[in-house]
Image (spheres, rainbow, N blue to C red):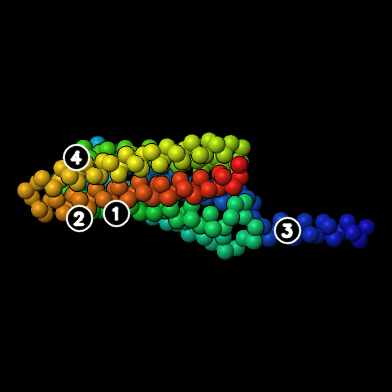
Amino acid sequence: MLYINIELNTVGLKEWIIPQDKVFFDLLESLAALVVSGSEELLSLMQNYEKLSEKVQQIKDIEHEADLVSHRIYEHLNLTFITPIEPEEISRLASALDDIMDYINSSTRKMQNYEIKSSDDAMLEFSKIIRQSVIELYDAVKAIRSFRNPHLIEEHCIEVNRLENLADELLARTISELFKSNEPMLVIKLKDIYECLEVATDKCEDVANVLSNIAIRHS
């Protein structure tokens, strides 16, 4: 009888110390969803640039929400002894997702601060690549909750890598064309914006690399 009581007490203590596994998955999915929302606002801005101030503020608000979710993830990590995946993986995943949102926000702030009068084809194409990349990442983040199909996670990550390569090529072509301009100040401003948008795709690839490593460990 004494043995049974000890077992029950041990189970109760374990449940008290260790939060539900789903907490981290819920938070990571929320963070990924916010990044998707940010990418959609970015694409909407490029398609309707007249609403620049409004979209910049909306993206800034989303970026702030993403920061809050990231902070909650780090708080839970500090309070949790056992996590569903490695703590370092959770931390890197949260940080890289938050970085995507930071660069989306930074890109639109630069457009506003540099007083860019209109979007162009390159900005629109970068925005489409970013949006498609984060949609792939969102689906991959959802898939790590169960690990029933690690190959599906890999497929999403491979697609993100392909999209990042497209962004690299787009940047190279765009910068090459940009340097043919006779407006040096405009060249400096646009180059900075294009590079900032391209870094957002680099950050998407960072997330994909973390997710790919997680998938490999659980395959």
As helix, strand or loop, the secondary structure at mark 1 comes to helix
| N-term-proximal mark, 4 vs 1 | 1
Residue at horizontal 74%, vertical 60%?
13
Callout 1 amino acid: Ser
Name the outermost residue toward the bottom: 78
Location of mark 4 (residue): 120
Q: Which residue lies under the disc numbered 3?
A: 14
Task: Locate the N terminus and report the quarter of the image it occupies.
Answer: bottom right
Q: Which residue is mark 2?
A: 113
For the residues labelled 3 and 4, say whether their Cβ atoms are less than 8 Å apart: no
Q: CA distance from mark 2 to mark 3?
A: 52 Å
Determine whether 78 is above or below 215 in the image: below
Query: Residue 49, can we see it?
Result: no
**Separation of residues labelled 1 and 2 (CA atoms):** 10 Å
In percent of width and height, residue 176 lies at 17, 45
Residue 197 image offset from top left, x and y in percent: 29, 48
